[in-house]
């Protein structure tokens, strides 16, 4: 619990508003956390217990057994999906961040004709819904036989116009021109200066860009839906979706869907909690627009 | 890396560090062109073609058909039903979600609430849950066959034709309310507190401070979240697609994007491309129009 600031305590707020405010916040805490709590509890149960025991409390705790079964199911296809997602989102997010940082930095730190035009085109890209791109991307990729490959998901994922927008704002704020001048006098090349000096100053922004792009790729649904046929290329979210559509034919998948959902969500929640101070700055920057 | 020598560039407009600018911008620029601009252009081009056959069983070939696909788009009942469905969805869900987000943000920012750090995190956690997973969870909780809360779900048909749209709205609200709360909250935090200390000393209550001072100051943040929510609503895909496993009331053309996929699967890619173009334009016009409308209202007041 956080202590009240001295400013807040100067005038004591009346009791009724205080109690009703806490009541509202508590009720919605239940709303936001209960489904996740249920998922955790359900994942820890045998298939038979899920519907017959108290849904919000543990029966015999077999979470780790269930996770083991999930990883072993059909030669570890779930682990394969998890690994795919880490590759698509981790590697894709990293490359997207680097490209966006370079482009945003170029737009922020150099003056050249057409700079504003380029920036506006990129901003327009932020407004284009990515789902509007999925179908034409599929049509284009099928012309060059790239559908149903790793690249069909990876290549579109490394372009982040929103990242360029954030990188431009942060580069303008956090990389002083004097520093670049000093670096020029030392005889360092421009690109070299970017990689040795500027990147370090932009690190908080880069973490934010990476995080948002990582989540966007991890959660992407339209692209795998339209591009992928082979199971071994699925990202984990799409694999789980696929299992969920087969529940009526293969009921024992239900337990795997629940445990798999839990396992796929935990890394995201942990990452978000660990990197809080970074993305909160990023949200603030987005709101300044 | 190449750095252009001053002598060579002086003849035209002299741009210092031209080589560095190209080296830094081009990798993104080329990929942006390949995976954003080209697909958009290609979708527009595809939407202008029609399939033509020589006789009933003749060879099919693609020929330029002008705007004939767009005539079909405007005649497509399934497409417009899905667009109107999402507009109804948005008119109800977006204000509820943003109203809640604003309420939470104001409460967090007021001295009425203790344990801010905890609430902030608890409300934001659903944003880390992918839409597919959120829909699987809520679908399981609301389904009469699968839900552990049978007392409720066997009496109220959350996944029937009447309510399923609002069950999906609940999933979207659950995922995004906390995210929008944080955007509004971070904009509340940037207001200097002296502004309302004076009002507080004059005897204004927290409600009055929120209504007359805070809400007008965070209008830009609210507008931003509204624009993003409008875009998101028209693009809705993952949640209703997952709900098809739980409910037969969700048809294959329930949302505009599902209509695009169903049409492309026929396969009628040219009509699907035309749907995509119309959908992207509708989204753009709605979000951009809302933005301009709010700006004009700002100027008037």
Image (cartoon, coloured by chain):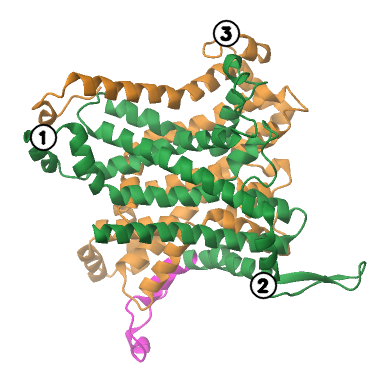
Percent of width and height locating residue A185 = 23, 70
Percent of width and height locating residue A181 = 23, 68
- A65 on left or right of B130: right
Q: Is residue B1 above or below residue A224?
A: below
Q: Is residue A225 above or below residue A40?
A: below
The hue of chain B in the figure is green
User: How far apart are labels 1 and 3 at the CA level?
Assistant: 52 Å
Closer to the camera in the image, A102 or B1: A102
> Which numbered circle lies on residue A59?
3
Q: Assess disc 1: are there few (<14), some (14-19) or many (≥20) residues with their C-alpha within 10 Å of its C-alpha.
A: some
Q: Is residue B107 above or below residue A124?
A: above
Q: Secondary structure at mark 2?
A: loop
Q: Are marks 1 and 3 on the same chain?
A: no
Tell me which corner region of the image, top left, top right, bottom left or bottom right, holds residue A249: top right
Percent of width and height locating residue B56 = 91, 67
- B83 on left or right of B176: right
- B162 on left or right of B129: right
Q: Earlier in the sequence, mark 2 or mark 1?
A: 2
Residue that label 2 marks: B67
From the image, state whether disc 3 or disc 2 is nearer to you: 2
Can you see residue B69? yes
Can you see residue A141? no
Q: Secondary structure at mark 1?
A: helix
Q: Secondary structure at mark 3?
A: loop
User: How far apart are labels 3 and 2 at the CA level?
Assistant: 62 Å
- Who's orange, chain-wise? A
Closer to the camera in the image, B291 or B7: B291
- In the image, which residues are magenta? B1-27
Residue that label 1 marks: B200
């Amino acid at each position: 619990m956080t202590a009240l600031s001295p400013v807040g305590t100067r005038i004591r707020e009346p009791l009724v508003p205080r109690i009703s405010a806490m009541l509202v916040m508590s009720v919605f805490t239940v709303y936001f956390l209960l489904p996740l709590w249920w998922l955790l509890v359900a994942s820890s149960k045998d298939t038979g217990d899920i519907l017959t025991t108290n849904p919000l409390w543990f029966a015999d705790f077999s979470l780790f057994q269930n996770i083991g079964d999930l990883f072993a199911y059909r030669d570890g296809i779930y682990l394969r999906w998890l690994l795919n997602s880490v590759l698509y989102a981790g590697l894709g997010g990293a490359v997207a961040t680097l490209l966006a940082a370079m482009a945003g930095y170029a737009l922020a730190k150099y003056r050249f004709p057409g700079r504003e035009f380029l920036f506006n085109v990129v901003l327009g890209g932020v407004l284009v819904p990515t789902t509007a791109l999925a179908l034409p991307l599929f049509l284009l990729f099928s012309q060059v036989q790239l559908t149903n490959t790793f690249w069909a998901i990876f290549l579109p994922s490394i372009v982040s116009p929103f990242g360029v927008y954030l990188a431009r704002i942060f580069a303008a704020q956090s990389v002083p021109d004097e520093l670049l001048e000093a670096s020029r006098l030392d005889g360092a090349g421009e690109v070299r200066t970017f990689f040795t000096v500027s990147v370090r100053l932009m690190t908080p922004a880069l973490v934010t860009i990476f995080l948002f792009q990582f989540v966007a790729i991890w959660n992407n649904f339209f692209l795998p839906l339209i591009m992928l046929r082979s199971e071994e290329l699925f990202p984990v979210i799409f694999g789980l979706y696929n299992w969920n559509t087969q529940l009526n034919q293969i009921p024992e998948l239900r337990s795997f869907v629940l445990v798999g959902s839990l396992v796929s969500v935990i890394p995201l929640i942990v990452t978000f909690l660990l990197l809080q101070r970074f993305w909160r700055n990023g949200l603030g920057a987005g709101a300044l627009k | 890396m190449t750095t252009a020598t001053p002598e060579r560039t002086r003849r035209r407009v002299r741009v210092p560090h031209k080589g560095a600018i190209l080296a830094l911008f081009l990798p993104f620029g080329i990929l942006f062109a390949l995976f954003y601009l080209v697909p958009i252009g290609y979708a527009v081009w595809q939407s202008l073609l029609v399939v033509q056959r020589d006789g009933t069983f003749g060879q099919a070939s693609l020929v330029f058909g002008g705007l004939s696909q767009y005539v079909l788009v405007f005649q497509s009942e399934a497409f417009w039903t899905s667009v109107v469905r999402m507009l109804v969805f948005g008119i109800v869900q977006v204000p509820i979600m943003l109203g809640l987000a604003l309420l939470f943000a104001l409460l967090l920012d007021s001295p009425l609430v203790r344990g801010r750090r905890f609430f902030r995190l608890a409300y934001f956690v659903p944003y880390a849950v992918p839409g597919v997973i959120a829909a699987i969870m809520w679908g399981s909780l609301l389904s009469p066959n699968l839900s552990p809360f049978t007392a409720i779900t066997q009496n109220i048909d959350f996944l029937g034709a009447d309510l399923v749209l609002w069950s999906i709205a609940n999933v979207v609200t659950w995922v995004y309310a906390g995210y929008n709360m944080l955007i509004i909250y971070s904009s509340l935090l940037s207001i200097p507190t002296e502004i309302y200390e004076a009002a507080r000393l004059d005897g204004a209550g927290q409600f009055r401070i929120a209504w007359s001072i805070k809400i007008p100051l965070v209008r830009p943040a609210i507008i931003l979240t509204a624009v993003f929510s409008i875009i998101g609503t028209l693009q809705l895909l993952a949640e209703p697609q997952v709900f098809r496993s739980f409910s037969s009331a969700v048809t294959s053309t329930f949302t505009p994007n599902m209509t695009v996929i169903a049409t492309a699967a026929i396969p009628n890619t040219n009509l699907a491309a035309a749907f995509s173009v119309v959908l992207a334009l509708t989204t753009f016009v709605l979000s951009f129009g809302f933005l301009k409308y709010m700006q004009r209202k700002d100027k008037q007041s």
